[in-house]
Image: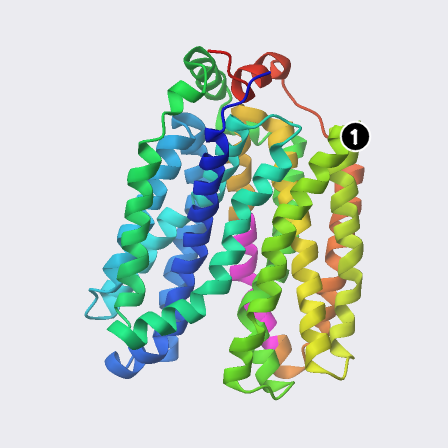
Amino acid sequence: MKYYPIRWFVVFLVFVATGLSFLDRQVLSIAIIKIQKEFGFSDVEYGWVNTSFLFSYALMFTVGGWLIDRFGAKKGLGVAVGVWSVANALHGLMTGLPQLITFRFLLGMGEGACFPGAAKTVYDWFDKKERAFANGIAIGGSAIGAVIAPPLTIWLSELYGWRAGFVIPGLIGIVWVIVWFFIPWKKSISQQAAVEVTKRAESIPFGTILKFKETWVFILMRFLLDPVMYFMMFWIPKYLSEVRGVSFERIGSLFWIPFLALGISNILGGFLSDKLVKNNFSINKARKTVMGCAAALTLAVPFTEYTSTVEVAVGLMALYMFAHGCWITNYITAISDIFGPKATSTVVGLSGTAGAVSSLLLNPMIGKIVQDYSYKPMWIASGLLYPIAFTAFAILIPKIKFLFKEEETLTPNIASINQ
């Protein structure tokens, strides 16, 4: 079986794309300090800016996934990166609140298709024995983007002003799109196989996908678990400041550590899963072994409330991020194992929308709990929800297996090239 090395370049480009997606969305959270001083935006108006992004992001997770399953990963992901890169660069030209809300909405539209496109790309280029590792690399870029966003934005702002923090990453994204479209996709995948994959994908209507029990299991898992991840991303700096008394400068020196753990575990979780498959574990056993171990690790997270040192608390946050990275890589890979080229992007998109909607609904509740009580319920929930979700996953999907009969004919055509 012959493999083209170009597939690793493709997955590297997806790594860069997911990194840019998290980098681009986080620039505003840092630049807003200067933007508010210049334009006088209130915190309420800033809240509407964030809502604009989350609304289009949640919508396009599903719509973007559906479109990518129809038109292919190369076109779909390329257009998505182009849309959000232009939108991000336009942030640097804004002169008022309506423009900022509009550009933020466009940013969410592009970024909503990022992870469905990444999952579809990996499925197109890798077989089941390497798919989890490739998925880990692909989505691992998001964590690295989150790590470098704060120092990069501050550095660019100090050198060239806050507008450069948007324009320069936007221009990098446009260069990425040019490189992406120059990849000889049809030379790397049998053209006949690609046509057949597209035809089969189009034969699964959206309504039919919703009839599968497996679709709803994946949707409900993200609905249940994504608020935990958003809690970690949006509330931890406030927790460190208000509860732990950590200075603003020190928060910047600590908060990148959990995201680094996330990036490492994205890749490691996929590597371990594929290693188990190569050692004669079934797909079902390999994916669930890693996901089960990750769920067990989160049981330590509630101790964050009781530890006396900031360093141990941050270490437990990093442990959570490490567990989540192993979990999410195998979660996305399990979707591709079950739905293949027919519906992988659509189901990844549906589940991503569910997670974003859940987070939109629950964030005000989190604020109320933190304000009127404490962070303790959030730490307890963070530790228990993953084991609950894994138990439900194991019961409701007792065996991870391809839903359609064509897998054996599709896999060699997509993953191996004998031209």
User: Where does residue 20 sit, x and y in percent of width and height?
Assistant: 41, 53
Quarter of the image where one finds residue 290: top right
Describe residue 258's horizontal placement relative to residue 89 as left or right.
right
Please report the bounds of the magenta region as a residue range: 354-368
Whether residue 134 sits left or right of residue 282 in the image: it is: left
Q: As rendered, which of 419 and 287 lies closer to the eye? A: 419
Q: Which residue is mark 1?
A: 279
Please identify the quadrant where the N terminus is shown. top right
Asked where in the image residue 366 lies, by quadrant, the reply is bottom right
| Residue at x 79% of width, y 65% of height | 300
Considering depth in this image, is 192 or 368 the residue closer to the camera? 192
At x 69%, y 78%, the residue is: 311
Looking at the image, is 22 positioned above or below residue 199?
A: below
For residue 88, above or below residue 348: below
Residue 142: tell me if it is visible.
Answer: yes
Q: Is residue 8 magenta?
A: no
Main secondary structure of the magenta stretch:
helix
Residue 355 inside the magenta-drawn segment:
yes
Give how far across and how far down residue 370 sits, in percent: 62, 78
Q: Is 272 placed above or below 183 here?
A: below
What is the count of numbered marks? Answer: 1
Q: Does residue 249 appear to the left or right of 330 in the view shown?
A: left
Residue 190: percent from left, percent from top:
45, 14
Residue 371, position as x, y percentages in the image: 60, 82
| Identity, as a three-letter code, of the amino acid under mark 1 | Asn
- Residue at 35% x, 36% y: name it: 180
Q: Is residue 378 visible?
A: no
Query: What kind of element bears circle 1?
Result: loop
